[in-house]
C-alpha cells in the first residue's frame, strides 16, 4: 500500500466535483492491487478515493468504460446503486500527469454499510448468493462485446499454467525446495482440472472477483446491498463468480489462514449460498449449472497457483506484508481446493437440486 500525505489527497479531491470542505482521509489496507482511502468530513465517511494500479490494469480508460457501462444496469429495489463522482471536466477518473502518472477515481460512500472477510452465518451466505445472482440477472442483457478485457485471460487456466511453468524455470532453487509439496500439488491438480474442462458455456458480463468482502451488506439488516471493486468486470463464465464466492464463504477462515485445520468446507453455508442464487428468477443454462462444482475447485486453485507463481517470481505482482506471504496464501488456497475436491459429489447434488430448470 502506497501512503500519501493528506495534503496531496486534498489537492487531488479538488479535481472532482465535490463541495469544498475540510476532508480527512483514512487508508483502507485490505486490497492487494489498488490504493484505497476513505474520505471523511466531520468524521463521517462520504467518499471512497482510489488510485487504480495501472501496471495491473493497463487500459484504465477502457476499464472505467466497463464500470460505467455496467453501473447503468446495476440498480434495483434490492440492488443498491453505486455512483462515480465526475471530475470537474466531466470525466469518470482523473489522470494525474504531474510526476509519476497516476489514475484516481472517486465514488460515493454507501452509508450504514459493511463488508465481511469471513462468515459463519447461513443468512449472510444466502444474501451473498442472492446479490451475485441479482448482479447477473441485471446484466443478463448487457452486450459482452461492449466490455474490454481489463486483464486479458484473467481466469484462464492455460495462461496461469504457462506463467507458473515460466516462473518455475527461473526460480531460485532454494525457493523451489521450500515449496516442494506445493509444486507437486499444483502440477497434479493442473492435470486433474484439465481433464474436467467444460465447453459450450455462454459468455456473460461477470464481476470476476466475487470474494465475500467485495459484497456490501446493510449494517442494520444484514441484507446484501451490492457488489463493489468493479475493476474486473468483463466477459467471463458464471462459474468463475460462483467459485470465487464459494472459496470465501464456505471456508470460514480467512483466505490466507495458515492453520489449515481451520480451513473448512461448511456444507450448510454452501447450501445457503446456492439457495440465495436460486431465490432469483432462473437465469442459468443447464451447462452453466453443471459447471458450478468445477468453479468451486477452479477458482481457489487459480488464486493459489497465481500466488505460488508470484512467490517464485519474488513478489512482483501482489503487495506482500512479508517475504513468504504469497507462499502461505497459495498453501491455504490449495488446502481449500483439496477440501472442495473432496466435496465434489455433494456440490453436484445440491446445485442440481436447488437450481434445476
Ligand atoms: C486481488 O486487491 P484485491 O483484493 O481487490 C486480485 C483478486 C483476488 C484478491 C484476493 C486484479 O484483488 O483476483 O481475489 O486479490 N485482483 C487482481 O486473493 O489480481
Ligand atoms: Mg479486486
Image (cartoon, rainbow, N blue to C red):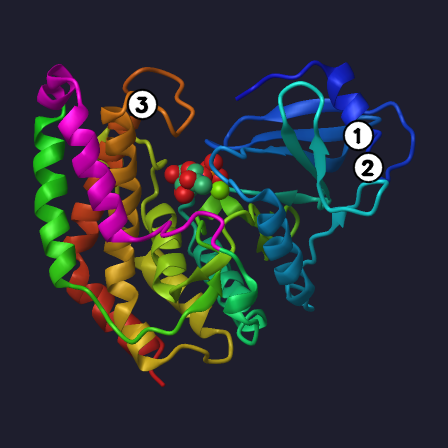
Q: Quadrant of the C terminus?
A: bottom left
Our reading of the magenta stretch's main secondary structure is: helix
For ligand 2, tell me if the residue under mark 2 lies within 8 Å: no
> Would you name the residue on which mark 2 appears?
16
Query: Looking at the image, in which quadrant does ligand 1 appear?
Result: top left
For label 3, the residue is: 325
Where in the figure is residue 171, as x and y percent of width and height?
A: 17, 23
- Quadrant location of residue 316? top left
Label of residue 177 in the image: none
Do labels 1 and 2 touch, CB within 8 Å?
Answer: yes
Residue 118 in view of the camera: no
Q: Nearer the viewer, mark 3 or mark 2?
A: 2
Give the spatial CA distance, label 1 vs label 2: 5 Å
Q: Is residue 237 left or right of residue 74?
A: left
Residue 290 vertical placement versus 193 (above, below): below
Q: Residue at x 59, y 56 (%)?
A: 66
Count the numbered circles shown: 3
311 relative to 11 in the view: left or right: left
Helix, strand or loop status at disc 1:
helix
Local secondary structure at mark 3:
helix
Query: Which residue, given by chain and number where applicable, does mark 1 sit on?
Result: 13
Image: magenta residue range: 149-178
Q: Are marks 3 and 2 in contact (CB under 8 Å)?
A: no
Residue 106, given in percent of the width and then of the height, sits at: 72, 39
From what the image shows, is residue 57 above or below residue 169?
A: below
Name the N-terminal-most of marks 3 and 2: 2
Q: CA distance from mark 3 to mark 1?
A: 34 Å
- Nearest the viewer among 244 and 90 is 90
Identify the residue at horizontal 77%, vertical 26% (top origin): 12
Amino acid at each position: 500500500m502506497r501512503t500519501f500525505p493528506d495534503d496531496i489527497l486534498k489537492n487531488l479531491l479538488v479535481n472532482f466535483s465535490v463541495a469544498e470542505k475540510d476532508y480527512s482521509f483514512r487508508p483502507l489496507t485490505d486490497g492487494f492491487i489498488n490504493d484505497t482511502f476513505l474520505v471523511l468530513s466531520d468524521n463521517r465517511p462520504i467518499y471512497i478515493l482510489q488510485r487504480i494500479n495501472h501496471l495491473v490494469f493497463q487500459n484504465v480508460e477502457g476499464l472505467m468504460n466497463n464500470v460505467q457501462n455496467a453501473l447503468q444496469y446495476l440498480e434495483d429495489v434490492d440492488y443498491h446503486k453505486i455512483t462515480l463522482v465526475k471530475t470537474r471536466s466531466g470525466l469518470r477518473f482523473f489522470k494525474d500527469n504531474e510526476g509519476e502518472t497516476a489514475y484516481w477515481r472517486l465514488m460515493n460512500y454507501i452509508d450504514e454499510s459493511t463488508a465481511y472477510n469471513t462468515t459463519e452465518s447461513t443468512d449472510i451466505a444466502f444474501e451473498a448468493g442472492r446479490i451475485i445472482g441479482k448482479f447477473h440477472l441485471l446484466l443478463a442483457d448487457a452486450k459482452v462485446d461492449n466490455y474490454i478485457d481489463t486483464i486479458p485471460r484473467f481466469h484462464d487456466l492455460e495462461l496461469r499454467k504457462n506463467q507458473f511453468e515460466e516462473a518455475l524455470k527461473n526460480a531460485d532453487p532454494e525457493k523451489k525446495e521450500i515449496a516442494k509439496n506445493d509444486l507437486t500439488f499444483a502440477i497434479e491438480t493442473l492435470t486433474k482440472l484439465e481433464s474436467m474442462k467444460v465447453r459450450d458455456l455462454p459468455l456473460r458480463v461477470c464481476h470476476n472477483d466475487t470474494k465475500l468482502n467485495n459484497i456490501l451488506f446493510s449494517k442494520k439488516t444484514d441484507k446484501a446491498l451490492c457488489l463493489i471493486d468493479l475493476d474486473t468486470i468483463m466477459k467471463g463464465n458464471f462459474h468463475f463468480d460462483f467459485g470465487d464466492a464459494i472459496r470465501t464463504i464456505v471456508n470460514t477462515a480467512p483466505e490466507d489462514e495458515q492453520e489449515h485445520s481451520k480451513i473448512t468446507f461448511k456444507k450448510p453455508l454452501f447450501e445457503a449460498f446456492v439457495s440465495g442464487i436460486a431465490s432469483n428468477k432462473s437465469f442459468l443454462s443447464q451447462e452453466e449449472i453443471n459447471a458450478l462444482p468445477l468453479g468451486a475447485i477452479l477458482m481457489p486453485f487459480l488464486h493459489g497457483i497465481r500466488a505460488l507463481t508470484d512467490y517464485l517470481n519474488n513478489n512482483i505482482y501482489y503487495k506482500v506484508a512479508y517475504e513468504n506471504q504469497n507462499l502461505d496464501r497459495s498453501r491455504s488456497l490449495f488446502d481449500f481446493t483439496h477440501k472442495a475436491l473432496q466435496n465434489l459429489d455433494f456440490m453436484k447434488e445440491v446445485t442440481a437440486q436447488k437450481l434445476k430448470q
